[in-house]
Image (cartoon, rainbow, N blue to C red):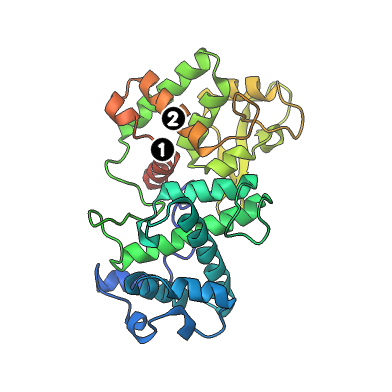
């Protein structure tokens, strides 16, 4: 069996499209050649509904041109249409929860919060059916599209550090997690398990080893664990989960995590969520962030560094780690 690589989940699916590669060659701060030719979304053929188009065109000139350039960089009219609706929905939510914050000033935390609310059905604006939970695949598509927008904006210099903007939603922020800190994080996960916090230990270990997203961990069941070979005594060594594109990928599980997985899966019925919060709810960004920070502190990472641990940063570090 071949294993899918853990890296690449943080980079948006179309982040390396032809237009974005060209933007990088032009260098930061250089506007895409079509952005000035098409100053607004309404000049792009085939986009609807009108309310979404007008919403983006009502933004300041810099943001409006950036959004139009990003949409033009999409490979087809259908993709542009889907991206327009996603961006407009996110913008409506952003304006409702944080009035006055510009679209280009949103951070990865805003994207995480928006997608988490979409997943649990807590959105009241920016969706066709307010209060209705969206499927994991739909949420992943929204997150991927929005990450692509911020990646594109950063790549052309529309967003810069220090001027009120943010880096791309999934771009690792400085300082990055070091190899030694990852070793201490694994040690900290062992300390959590020893203290009876097995679910948190497994979550920390899996995101550190595989770069899995929070949504992927939240949907794992005992049926996603697979033994190599045959026999009841054979250790669990493989875990399957869905990546940001909704594709099923398989990862080898580190040997030191096997006893925790056995202990956790033994308490779950078939189809039950493998990793749950203390109140029985699925894994959330806040819960996993707290688990990472607790594991970091327990493992000996400096407190000033442990408090910076975040699932997005660890995913980026895993993707960048040498094979």
Give neighbour class at mark 1: few <14, some 14-19, many 20+ (Cα, 10 Å).
some
Decide: is 178 above or below 93: above
Indicate which disc residue 94 carries: none
**Between residues 171 and 206, which one lies in front from this camera angle?**
171
Q: Residue at x 54, y 19 (%)?
A: 197
Q: Is residue 97 visible?
A: yes
**Between residues 57 and 232, which one lies in front from this camera angle?**
57
x, y percentage for residue 57?
Answer: 44, 75
Give the side of residue 314 with respect to residue 76, left or right: left
Q: Dot 2: what SS? A: helix
Quarter of the image where one finds residue 77: bottom right
Give the side of residue 101 with respect to residue 6, left or right: left
Q: Quadrant of the N terminus?
A: top right
Q: Is residue 246 visible?
A: no
Q: Residue at x 39, y 54 (%)?
A: 106
Give the side of residue 249 with respect to residue 176, left or right: right
Q: Residue at x 59, y 76 (%)?
A: 49
The residue to which callout 2 is attached is 292
Q: Residue at x 53, y 70 (%)?
A: 84
Q: Rounded to the nearest whole Å, what is the CA distance between mark 2 and mark 1?
A: 7 Å
Quarter of the image where one finds residue 179: top left
Give neighbour class at mark 2: few <14, some 14-19, many 20+ (Cα, 10 Å).
many
x, y percentage for residue 201?
Answer: 51, 24
The residue to which callout 1 is attached is 310
Q: Quadrant of the C terminus?
A: top left
x, y percentage for residue 226?
Answer: 67, 34
Q: Dot 1: what SS? A: loop
Q: Earlier in the sequence, mark 2 or mark 1?
A: 2
Q: Are marks 2 and 1 in contact (CB under 8 Å)?
A: yes
x, y percentage for residue 3?
Answer: 56, 46
């Amino acid at each position: 069996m071949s294993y899918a690589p853990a890296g690449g989940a943080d980079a948006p699916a179309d982040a390396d499209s032809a237009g974005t590669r060209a933007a990088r060659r032009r260098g930061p701060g250089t506007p895409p050649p079509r952005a000035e030719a098409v100053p607004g979304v309404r000049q792009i053929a085939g986009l609807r509904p009108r309310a979404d188009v007008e919403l983006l065109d009502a933004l300041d000139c810099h943001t409006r041109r950036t959004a139009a350039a990003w949409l033009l960089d999409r490979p087809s009219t259908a993709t542009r249409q889907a991206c327009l609706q996603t961006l407009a929905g996110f913008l409506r939510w952003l304006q409702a929860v944080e009035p006055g914050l510009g679209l280009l000033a949103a951070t990865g935390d805003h994207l995480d919060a928006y997608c988490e609310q979409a997943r649990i059905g807590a959105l009241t604006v920016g969706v066709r059916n307010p209060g209705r939970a969206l499927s994991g695949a739909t949420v992943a598509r929204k997150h991927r599209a929005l990450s692509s927008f911020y990646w594109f904006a950063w790549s052309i210099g529309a967003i810069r550090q220090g001027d009120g903007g943010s880096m791309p939603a999934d771009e690792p922020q400085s300082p990055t997690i070091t190899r030694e800190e990852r070793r201490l994080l694994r040690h900290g996960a062992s300390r959590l398990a020893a203290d009876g916090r097995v679910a948190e230990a497994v979550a920390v270990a899996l995101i550190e080893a595989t770069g899995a997203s929070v949504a992927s961990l939240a949907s794992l069941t005992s049926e996603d664990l697979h033994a190599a070979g045959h026999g009841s005594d054979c250790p669990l060594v493989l875990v399957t989960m869905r990546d940001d594109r909704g594709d099923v990928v398989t990862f080898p599980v580190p040997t030191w995590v096997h006893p925790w997985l056995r202990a956790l899966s033994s308490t779950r019925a078939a189809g039950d969520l493998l990793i749950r919060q203390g109140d029985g709810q699925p894994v959330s960004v806040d819960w996993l962030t707290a688990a990472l920070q607790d594991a970091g502190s327990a493992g000996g990472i400096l407190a000033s560094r442990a408090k910076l641990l975040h699932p997005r940063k660890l995913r980026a570090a895993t993707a960048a780690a040498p094979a």
